[in-house]
Amino acid sequence: MASKTLRATALSTLIAASLMLAACNKQQAAPANAAPPPVPVSVVTLTAGNVALGRELSGRASASQTAEVRPQVTGIVERLLFSEGGSVKAGQVLYQIDQTAFRAAAGSAEASLARAQAALTTARLNAERSAELVKIDAVSRQEDETAQATLRQAQADVNAARAALQSANVPLGFTRVSAPISGRISHSSVTRGALVTAGQASALATIQQLDPMYVEVTQSSSELLQLRREIEAGQAQAAGSVPVEIVLEDGSVFPHAGQLRFAEATVDPTTGSVLLRVVVPNPEQLLLPGMYVRARLTNAERQGAILAPQQGITRDAKGNATALVVNAENKVEPREVVVSRAIGDKWLVESGLAAGDKLIVEGLQKVKPGSAVTPTEAGAAAAAAGTAKPEADSAPANAASAK
C-alpha cells in the first residue's frame, strides 16, 4: 500500500509540474506575438534660414609692393646707411657711392656756366651800346645787328651751360641710393668697398611693403559659374562686400579680416581656375611673403536654406545620400536627399528634406523604415540628462523629512 501511495503522489507531482511548465511557455510566447515597444530616438527639427555661401581656398601671402634697389651709376660703395632686415622709409638714403669723379664733372659744368654768364654780360653791354650808337649813325646797322646776334648767342650758351650743369648733377645725386618705397628691407648683397655698376643684373637689396599684404587664391571656374547661376535663378543673393577670414599655417585665425579686391577676368587654361586677390591688414607683420594660408570667403547668401546635421545623413550602397525622418504617426520614414556642400558640421540640402521635418540623428542603427519610435529633440535630451542628477540627490532629503 505504501508503494502505491508513493507512486500516486509522484505521478500527481509530475502532472502538476507539466501543467506549470506549459503555462510558463504560454506566458513567454505571448510577448513574441505582441507588437514591439516604440524605440527611443533623438531627432533634430529642421528649420529654414539664410545661409552664407562661402569657400575655403588655399593660397600664398605676398607683399603688396616690392622694389629692388639697384645702382644707377658706377662707383665704389663707401657706406651702408641702413640696418639689414629693418624697416626703411621712402626716400631714406641706403648706400653712399664715391662722389669724386661726379663732383669734378659737376664742378667743370658749373665753371662753364659761369664763363657763359660772363660772356653774356659782355654781349649784353655791347648790344645796348650798339643800339644807342646806331640811332645817331655812330655805327653801321650791320655792326648793330652783329652785336644783337652775339647777345642772343651768349644767352643760348648760358642755357646750354645750365643744362650741362643739371646733367652733371643727376649722376652726382645718384651716388646717394635711396629707398623707393617704405617697408622691410632684406640683407645687402654688397659690402663697403664693393664696385657697383649702372644697370647691373643683381639688386643691392629688396624692399617689401608688409602692411597691407596680398593673399592670392584660386577658385574653380565651374564653382563661379554655379554661383552665378544660383544668383540669376534667385536661389542666392550676391554679397555686397566680401569679408575674408584668413587661417594661418598652425590652424589659428588671423586677427584681421581681409577684403576681396578683385577676381581675374581670365581663366588659367592649365588649371581651369580664376585668380582672386585678397587685401589683408598686417599691422603686427605676422603675415610674411610666401606664407601658406587659407582664405574663407563669403560671396553669396542662400535664402530659405535647409541645413541638416551630418550625423543624420547616410549613404546607401550606390553612394546616394539618404535620411530617416519621423512622420506625424511617429514612424520612421526614409528619404532620398540631395546635398551640395558642407557648411561647418552640417550639409546644405538641395532636395529631399523640408522645414519642420524631424531628422533622426541618434539611434539610426536601432530602427528601420516603418518602425514605431519615441522622438526626443537632441537638445531636450541633453537638458533632461543634466537635470536628472539633482532630482535623484533630493530623494534622501525628502525621505529624511518624511521620517
Image (cartoon, grey):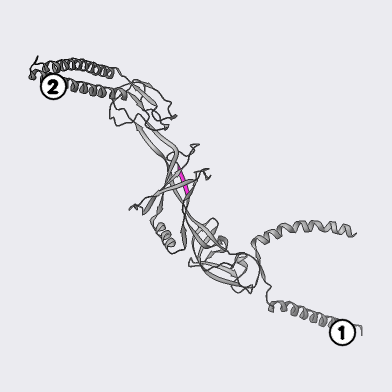
The correct choice, above or below, for 324 with respect to 34 in the image is: above
Q: Is residue 396 left or right of residue 200?
A: right
Between disc 2 and disc 1, whose residue precedes? 1
Q: Which residues are magenta?
A: 291-295
Examine the rendering and report whether any part of residue 263 can be seen: yes
Q: Is residue 221 left or right of residue 315?
A: left
Q: Give me the C-alpha separation between circle 2 and circle 1.
A: 167 Å
User: Residue 275 or 9: which is nearer the viewer?
Assistant: 275
Residue at the image point whose x is 47% and y is 60% from the top:
236
Residue behind mark 2:
149
Residue behind mark 1:
8
What is the tally of numbered marks visible in this picture? 2
The correct choice, above or below, for 247 with respect to 356 in the image is: above
Q: Quadrant of residue 127?
A: top left
Q: Amino acid at mark 1?
A: Ala
What is the secondary structure assignment of the residue under circle 2?
helix
> Would residue 139 be counted in the magenta stretch?
no
Q: Quadrant of residue 35?
A: bottom right
Examine the rendering and report whether any part of residue 74 can be seen: no
In what quadrant of the picture does the N terminus appear? bottom right
Residue at the image point whose x is 57% and y is 61% from the top:
311
From the image, give the main secondary structure of the stretch colored magenta.
strand
In what quadrant of the picture does the C terminus appear? bottom right
* Residue 357 drawn at (x, y percent): 58, 68
10 Å crowding of disc 1: few (<14), some (14-19), many (20+): few
User: Residue 129 or 171: which is nearer the viewer?
Assistant: 129
- Which mark identifies residue 350? none
User: Residue 221 or 137: which is nearer the viewer?
Assistant: 137
Q: Is residue 386 left or right of residue 125?
A: right
* Residue 363 drawn at (x, y percent): 63, 65
> Would residue 292 be counted in the magenta stretch?
yes
What is the secondary structure assignment of the residue under circle 1?
helix
